Amino acid sequence: MPVIEITKIDKQNMEPGLHLMELLVANYGVFQTYLVMFDDAGDVRWLLDMSDVGHIVYTDLRSENGNWIFMDESLIIEVSESGEVLLLEPIKQFAGNHDFIQLAPDRLLLAGSRNDAKAFKRDGSEMVTKFDHVLEYDRNTNKVSKFWDLAENLDLDRIVFNPDYTPDPEADWFHINSIAYDTKEESIVASGRTQGVLKVDQENNLKWILAPHARWGRAGRFGEGFDITDYLLTAVDSMGNPFPKEIQHGLAGTDEFEWFTGQHSLNILENGNILLFDNGMSRDFIPVPTYSRAVEYEIDEENMTVRQVWQYGKERGFDLHSLITSNVDVLSETNNRLITAGNIRVNQDQPNAKMVEITYPENKVVFEAKVIFKDAKGTGEKSWAQFDLLFKGHRYPLFQE
């Protein structure tokens, strides 16, 4: 287990509750999942050991009944607070990945794949793609009742990052890692690490794409669709003026606006703004470490523009730079932001993660925890499950009324 150090605490201005981390411990090529709650002194008060599953399982969902729901590529697993496995539900003909939300007690919205979704490789041969669907899952029937094929609205041939960031960059061309549901319009917003963020309606009609303008072509699994550039949001300043072309294309940024890269943890705020964790992977298309941050954007759908209205993290540089995983949560009682940088390894410090709570919009740090990894069951190499990390961090009461 990692060592937890509390480096800042201001209880008067913090969100109440314990600090929960979704811990992934490397075990020589296999991630073992643990949910860990610790208190303001850094002492562990509750731990749910999911390592017997034998591979990574994802959760950020505590149900209204207090149970925890996990997802992997083939199963939905419901577990009580005391560790009793209550339900094992198979996902048939589809696969889950990274994120899901609960629409109703019997309906889940999953990020994932369709097992027979084909497309052309760049050499002209066929392949089955993965991690490019949103799925509506019915817990009564244990079946996917509806799906949104995001490839119908995006360019599968668009290359943004170096190929070594993904083991199979052609099949895993989008890498969906976060989804949100716009209850006002009943629309879907999805984040793909290697492409950007898009919004679609119930019939999978594209509304907009939030991403740098560089390198977009035609939509569709076989490149037979519409011209995507008509749906790209234009970045504007505080006065509504568009930025120059190099900023629109993601080749540069300013203090007033920067595009995200390699992002995770998509949120739709009450005012309709988009909040996410910007990992900073190949920022400005340059593959060197820079910084990670939480960032909020205001979208004007009528005028098809986007404006950056808030950020935190750029000023801390490598201290919060996490190339992968990580998240940002809005805390319900204080409206503070809880930012988790899940895998910090580019500075001279020990490999670690940080959970930082800040006031909004003042950016005053009221809590910070440093989680120091041991990497005791891996080689430490930059390859799958050879080093420990945090997937996400949250704030919860220990018991739920």
Image: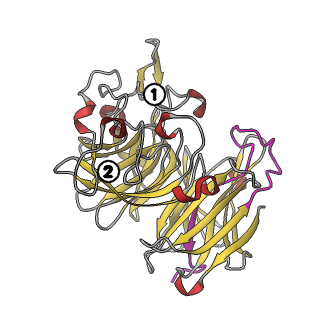
Question: Is 351 situated above or below 36?
Answer: above
Furthest toward the left, the residue is 302
Residue occupying image coordinates x 82% and y 48%: 377
Give the image location of residue 322, x and y in percent.
60, 50
The residue segment tinted magenta is: 372-401
Q: What is the crowding at mark 1: few (fewer than 14 residues within 10 Å), some, or many (at least 20)? A: some
Identify the secondary structure beneath mark 1: loop
* For residue 161, side relative to residue 369 (left or right): left
Give the image location of residue 167, x and y in percent.
60, 30
Residue occupying image coordinates x 58% and y 67%: 356
Q: Which residue is mark 1?
A: 159
Q: Nearer the viewer, residue 42 or 252?
A: 252
Mark 1 or mark 2: whose residue is earlier in sequence: 1
Q: How many marks?
A: 2
Question: Is 328 situated above or below 145?
Answer: below
Q: Is 320 included in the stretch rendered in magenta?
A: no
Magenta span dominant secondary structure: loop
Amino acid type at image mark 1:
Ile
Q: Which residue is mark 2?
A: 188
Q: What is the crowding at mark 2: few (fewer than 14 residues within 10 Å), some, or many (at least 20)? A: many
* For residue 328, side relative to residue 212 (left or right): right
Q: Is 386 included in the stretch rendered in magenta?
A: yes
What colour scheme has been applied to the protein in the rendered image? secondary structure
Give the image location of residue 248, x and y in percent.
33, 39
Give the image location of residue 31, x and y in percent.
70, 48
Residue occupying image coordinates x 60% and y 69%: 80
Amino acid type at image mark 2:
Ile
